[in-house]
Amino acid sequence: MYVCLCNGYTDRDIRNAVREGGVRTAEEAYLSLGNGFCCGACQDCACQLVEEELPNQRLLAAE
Ligand code: FES
């Protein structure tokens, strides 16, 4: 599902940035994907996705 229409980022892009890229905030996730926030309309949704995915990052780091 597209989360950010300005940049064309999907929920999967953001989740992968957290899991594999080691980012800890939505802003870091966006920058790792190439561009930061533009209009900011997606910010709440992106932050929620990052929060949801952070525990998975910790699990992978512990392996
Ligand atoms: S929709 Fe994501 S910055 Fe505009």
Image (cartoon, rainbow, N blue to C red):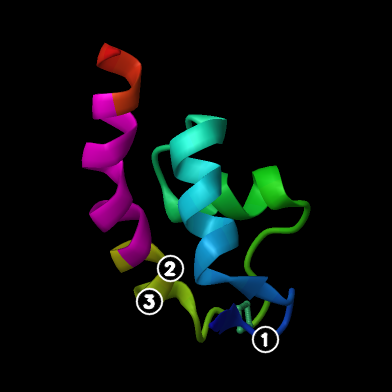
- Extreme front residue here? 63
Q: Few, some or many C-alpha atoms within 10 Å of disc 2 (few <14, some 14-19, many ≥20)?
A: many
- Residue 12, x across and y down, in percent: 53, 63
- Residue 21, x across and y down, in percent: 56, 33
Alpha carbons under labels 3 and 2: distance apart: 4 Å
Alpha carbons under labels 1 and 2: distance apart: 12 Å
Q: Mark 2 highlights which residue?
A: 46
Quadrant of the image occupied by residue 54: top left
Q: Which of 26 and 13 is in front in this view?
A: 13
| Above-or-below relation of 59 to 25 | above
Disc on res. 5: 1
For the record, the magenta segment spans 49-59
Q: Mark 3 highlights which residue?
A: 45
| Above-or-below relation of 46 to 21 | below
Residue at point 67%, 86% (across, down) = 5
Residue at point 43%, 68% (across, down) = 46
| Above-or-below relation of 48 to 22 | below
- Residue 62, x across and y down, in percent: 26, 14
